[in-house]
């Protein structure tokens, strides 16, 4: 309901009717629509944090580039497939412009992406697949590219997102190895 109508135009009565329960049943779990919106936001943020976690334990010289490509491809595929996520996440981005609580959490998610990619790229330096020069900037470029790909997917604009991601990865890693 929120994804279809937005937060402002969705009432608890509409939600209750849509899922086939009584409005008082919703109040058993949530004191207000705002509490439900908060709960959904927390759950979405948890899921994003889980999906954006990167581990380097199994990465080698031979699979680093493909791992990085696949990480981005998976994110792109998930966003393209789940139109409801895109719509509801847009609602939270709008809320974040008016409510610091949401902005703070969105900033935590973004910071997590920067930290994860920094760790990944520094590991790439360690194993010899990423050039040490400007490694943090390279890491930041990849985060900003994948984040903005997500933003463009949210708008519904049809572009070659996987091709863009692949070009960003290859550009950042250029000159280190000839695969």
Image: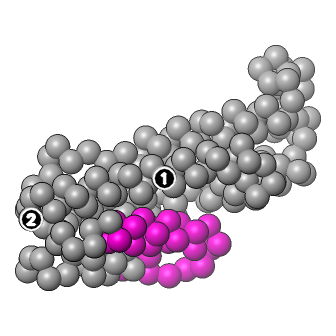
Residue at (18%, 69%) from the top-left corner?
A: 132
Q: Residue, x 9% and y 65% (percent of image)?
A: 128
Quadrant in which the C terminus is drawn: bottom left
- Seen as rendered, the residue at the extreme top is 28
Q: Residue at x 52, y 49 (%)?
A: 109
Where residue 106 appears, as percent x and y from the top left, is: 60, 51
Element marked by disc 1: helix
Q: In the image, is residue 134 above or below residue 10?
A: below
**Is 18 above or below relative to 31?**
below
Task: Choose between 17 and 47: the one closer to the eye.
Answer: 47
For label 2, the residue is 128
Q: Nearer the viewer, residue 104 or 152?
A: 104
Q: Verify whether residue 160 appears in magenta.
A: yes
The Cα atoms of the two marked residues, 1 and 2, are separated by 25 Å
> Which region is colored magenta?
137-163
Q: Along the line of sight, which residue is nearer the eye, 125 or 35? A: 125
Q: Main secondary structure of the magenta part?
A: helix
- Position above or below: 150 against 13: below
On the rendered structure, is 69 left or right of 83? left
- Where, by quadrant of the figure, is residue 45 drawn? top right
Crowdedness near tag 1: few (<14), some (14–19) or many (≥20) residues, C-alpha within 10 Å? few
**Residue positioned 44% across, 72% down in the render:** 145
Left or right of 153, for residue 173:
left
**Count of numbered tags:** 2
């Amino acid at each position: 309901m929120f994804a279809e109508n937005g937060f402002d135009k969705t009432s608890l009565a509409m939600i209750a009717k849509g899922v086939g329960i009584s409005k008082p049943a919703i109040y058993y779990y949530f004191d207000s629509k705002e509490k439900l919106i908060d709960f959904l936001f927390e759950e979405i943020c948890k899921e994003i944090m889980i999906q954006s976690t990167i581990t380097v334990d199994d990465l080698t010289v031979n699979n680093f580039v493909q791992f990085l490509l696949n990480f981005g491809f998976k994110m792109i595929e998930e966003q393209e497939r789940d139109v409801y996520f895109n719509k509801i996440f847009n609602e939270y981005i709008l809320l974040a412009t008016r409510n610091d609580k949401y902005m703070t959490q969105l900033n935590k998610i973004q910071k997590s992406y920067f930290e994860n990619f920094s760790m990944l790229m520094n590991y790439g330096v360690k194993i010899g697949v990423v050039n040490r020069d400007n490694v943090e900037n390279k890491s930041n470029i990849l985060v900003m590219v994948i984040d903005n790909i997500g933003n463009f997917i949210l708008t519904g604009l049809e572009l070659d997102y996987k091709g863009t991601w692949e070009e960003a990865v290859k550009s950042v890693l250029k000159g280190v190895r000839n695969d």
